[in-house]
Amino acid sequence: MSVRRLSKDQPASFAFTKETKEKVDWWIAKYPAGRQQSAVIPLLWLVQKQEGWVSEPAIRVVAETLSMPVIRVFEVATFYTMFQLERVGTVAHLQLCGTTPCMLRGANDLKAVCEAKIGHKDHRSADGRFSWEEVECVGACSNAPVIAINDYYYEDLTPEILEKIIDDFAKGENPKPGSYVGRSCSEPLGGPQTLTDPSLYDGSRAKKIKSLPNAPDKGGAKAPAQ
């Protein structure tokens, strides 16, 4: 894993909004007295949901909120790659999977689309609305190639489909996440190929079990021996 550092471009301060603070208090209350520091990951995630990324002032606020050393919060924020340490696109941040299954299924072509429509990876577009990065496996290999956009996965992509998705986001729309070849979950192309007979799993083939000799009756007494 590459070294992760905080952005050189930092805001002057950070504060939770009223709505986020309510969620912060809810998370902290989930832990017993003396264990509130266990809420550090949820609080950092709330920071990111509010701001789009995790800044140095936000790390300090989280540390103060949980009464823990700033360096401890810094260690968590820089260890987990789900936390963005640079400003990301205000409309959409794309995380393109470049690991082997996605690469074999056309991830490099999707990368070219991102470069053409957004710009260099790990940087925001000129208008600040879009950004993208290449990530390791996102765990949806059977539906490769895959891109995580904001909170959702977009699967079975082609360059043409990705271009349209980006254009739709730019127009203020919310493109449908999931498979773009009609898969349900991660089934094979063309539909399921196993367990296609409902009688294999609906219980209709199950044999009725007869009462065993000397088994207790409903009152707890054993049946008389034959």
Image (cartoon, helix red, strand yellow):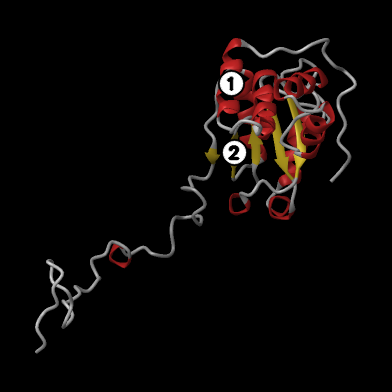
Above or below — where is 133 with respect to 10? below
Of the numbered discs 1 and 2, the one sitting upstream in the chain is 1
Above or below — where is 161 with respect to 183? above
**In the figure, is residue 148 to the left or right of 125?**
left
Dividing the picture into quarters, in which one does residue 16 lie?
A: top right
Crowd band around label 2 with a 10 angstrom C-alpha radius: few (<14), some (14–19), many (20+) = many
Mark sitting on residue 25: 1
Give amino acid for label 2: Tyr
Residue at image mark 2? 154
Marks 1 and 2 sit apart, C-alpha to C-alpha, by 33 Å
**In the figure, is residue 203 to the left or right of 153?**
left
Dividing the picture into quarters, in which one does residue 224 lie?
A: bottom left
Q: Element type at marker 2?
A: strand
- x and y, in percent, of residue 177 in the image: 54, 35
Q: Closer to the camera, 72 or 224?
A: 224
Crowd band around label 1 with a 10 angstrom C-alpha radius: few (<14), some (14–19), many (20+) = few
Question: Residue drawn at (9%, 89%), measured in percent from left and top?
Answer: 226
Mark 1 and mark 2 in contact? Answer it, CB < 8 Å. no
**In the figure, is residue 173 to the left or right of 38?**
left
- x and y, in percent, of residue 181 in the image: 52, 45
Dividing the picture into quarters, in which one does residue 91 lie?
A: top right
- x and y, in percent, of residue 51 in the image: 70, 18
Above or below — where is 25 with respect to 225? above
**In the figure, is residue 8 to the left or right of 54?**
right
Question: Residue drawn at (63%, 52%), measured in percent from left and top?
Answer: 141
Q: Closer to the camera, 105 or 76?
A: 76
Q: Element type at marker 1?
A: helix
Question: Residue drawn at (72%, 45%), measured in percent from left and top?
Answer: 107
